[in-house]
Image: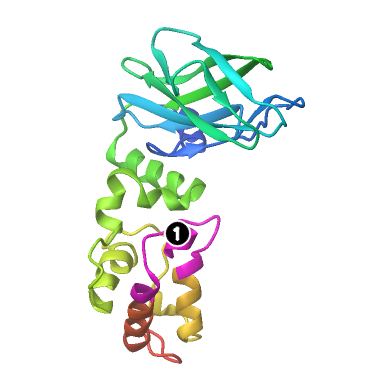
Amino acid sequence: MRSPIGFVLLLATMFTSPAVMVRAGMAEAGENALTWDDTEKTVVFDEAVRVAEIVFTASNQGPEPVTVLAVRPSCDCTAVRTPALPWTLNSDESGQIVVSLDLTGKMGEFEKTIAIETTAGEQSLLVRIMRAAPLTPTERRAFNQRRAWIDRQAIFRGGCARCHSPSESTLSGAELYERVCAICHEAAHRAAQVPVLGASADRDAAYWRNWIIEGRSQTMMPAFARDRGGVLSVDQIDRLVEFLLARFPAGSRL
C-alpha cells in the first residue's frame, strides 16, 4: 500500500502520456549560436508507455549559418533522431531533433542529457522523465484529473482522443453534445469539479460559445475550438450552441 504522502507527491507531479509539462530554459545565444524552444524539458508518462519521444526545436537567429556536427546522448537507452549530419541551419532557419528513450524497467524520476556540438560551440539539452508505477482504479482517476488540470488540452491527444475528438464533420448538435459534453457533464461518476450544465440561469449563445471555444484555464475544461488546440470547427460549434440553447433555455434552471 502506498503511503498517503507518497501518493500526494505522485499526483502533484504527474499527468498521463504522451503529454508534456515544460519548464522553459531558452539557450543563451551568441551571435551565431542556435537557440532552442527549451533546453530543459520535464515530461511525465504513465506506466503504459514503453518508449518516450520528446521534440526539441532549434532556431538559428544569427546572421551566419550554424552547422550541427555531432549529437551525443548520455546513455545507450537514449537515441536522438536528427536530420543528416553535418546539419546546417542558415540564418532564420529552424529544425527539430527527436529524443527517444526506452522506459522499460524504469520508474520514478530520472534525467538524460544530450550534448550538441556545433560550429558555434557546444550546447546541452536535458530531459527530466517522471514515470508512474501501476495505478489502482482510484489512483488512475485522480491521475487523469491531475493531468487535465495541468494540461487541459491533453484530452485531445493519445488514447483519450478516440472518445473526445468527433471526426465526422456532419454530426448534428445533439450528436456533438453526446460526444464532447455529456461524456463528462452527464457521466454517472463524474468528478466533483465537473458542473451540471443547466445549473446557471444566465445562459445565452455568447455564454455557450465562450465556454466551448475558450474552455477555462486551471480547470479540466479544455478549449474545444480548433484554433485554440481543440477539435471543433466553426460550423460544429454553431451546431452545438444551437442545441445547447434548446436543451438549456436561458432563464431556466435544472
Identify the residue shown where x is 64% and y is 37%. 92
Q: Nearer the viewer, residue 144 or 91?
A: 91
Give residue 17's position: percent from left, percent from top.
37, 36
Q: Does any portion of residue 209 appear in the rendered image?
A: yes
Q: Quadrant of residue 140?
A: top left
Residue 56 lies, in percent from the top left, at 52, 30
Residue at disc 1, secondary structure:
loop
Q: Amino acid at mark 1?
A: Pro
Q: Which of 141/160 is in front? A: 160
Q: Classify residue 63 as left or right of residue 198.
A: right
Residue under numbered circle 1: 222
Visible residue check, residue 132? no
11 over 113 or under it: above or below = below
In the image, residue 228 lies in the stretch drawn in magenta: yes
Q: Quadrant of the N terminus?
A: top left
Comparing 78 with 150, the one in front is 78
- Crowd rating for badge 1 (residues with CA inside 10 Å; few <14, some 14–19, many 20+): many
**30 sits left or right of 230 in the view:** right
Which quarter of the figure is the C terminus placed in?
Answer: bottom left
At which x and y percent is residue 142?
Answer: 39, 44
Task: State whether the magenta stretch is mostly helix, strand or loop.
Answer: loop
Figure quadrant of residue 2 = top left
Magenta segment: does it hold 139? no
The span shown in magenta is 213-237
